[in-house]
């Protein structure tokens, strides 16, 4: 028996997913979880609620972006090209808002209780967000990523299982 024959199809499926898809989908998933946790914190923790007042629109938008990142990151990780593009757009909106908020805070009046070194943290947030935005677009539009999503092309918008083989339960 050949050593390749002993490798299961799930091992091959896992190995064929590029490392960049793993890393960036997990980081985008983390961004979504942090966005949701931030909204929950601003509504549950009394000190945070006093410091920042989130309106209904800001709360709804933050939750929508956070949930969108969580869902699209998982579906993009599974190999859905449509959801990869949706994840790119949602992470772009999230990071643009992050840059916008940091810039507004940087060029606005910083509260006196913040240390003067806080502006360097804001610049770090802006640079990190720009770098992460560029990494997402560069990698997910690269030829290696496109090849992975072309191999795992799935019909339908919400189809979660593979339809190309006897493993799909609806093909029996």
Image (spheres, rainbow, N blue to C red):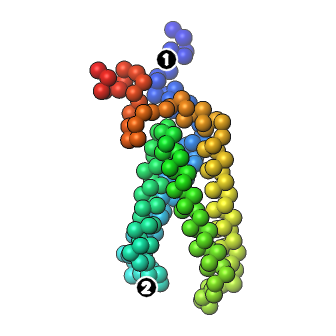
Q: Position of residue 85 (x, y in %)?
A: 53, 47
Position of 66 compared to 18: left or right? left
Pick the residue in front: 22 or 158. Answer: 158
Q: Is residue 157 visible?
A: yes
Query: What is the CA distance from the residue labelled 2 to the residue labelled 1?
Result: 60 Å
Give the residue drawn at x 55%, y 51%. 88
Q: Position of residue 51 (x, y in %)?
A: 47, 84
Q: Which residue is mark 2?
A: 50
Q: Which residue is mark 1?
A: 6
Give SS at disc 2: helix
> Eyeballing the image, is 66 above or below 111?
above
Give the residue drawn at x 61%, y 79%. 105
Q: Residues within 10 Å of mark 2 (few under 14, many from 20)?
A: few
Of labels 2 and 1, earlier in sequence is 1
> Eyeballing the image, is 102 above or below 80?
below
Give the residue drawn at x 46%, y 49%. 72
Q: Position of residue 80 (x, y in %)?
A: 48, 39
């Amino acid at each position: 028996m050949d050593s390749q024959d002993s490798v299961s199809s799930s091992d091959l499926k896992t190995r064929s997913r590029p490392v960049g898809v793993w890393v960036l989908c997990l980081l985008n998933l983390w961004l979504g979880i942090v966005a949701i946790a931030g909204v929950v914190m601003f509504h549950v923790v009394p000190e945070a609620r006093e410091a920042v007042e989130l309106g209904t629109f800001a709360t709804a938008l933050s939750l929508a972006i956070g949930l969108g990142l969580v869902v699209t990151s998982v579906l993009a990780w599974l190999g859905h090209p449509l959801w990869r593009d949706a994840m790119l757009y949602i992470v772009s909106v999230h990071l643009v808002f992050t840059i916008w908020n940091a810039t507004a805070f940087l060029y606005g009046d910083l509260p006196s209780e913040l240390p003067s070194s806080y502006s360097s943290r804001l610049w770090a947030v802006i640079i990190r967000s720009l770098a992460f935005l560029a990494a997402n677009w560069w990698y997910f539009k690269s030829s290696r990523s496109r090849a992975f999503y072309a191999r795992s092309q799935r019909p339908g918008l919400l189809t979660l299982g593979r339809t190309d083989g006897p493993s799909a339960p609806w093909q029996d």
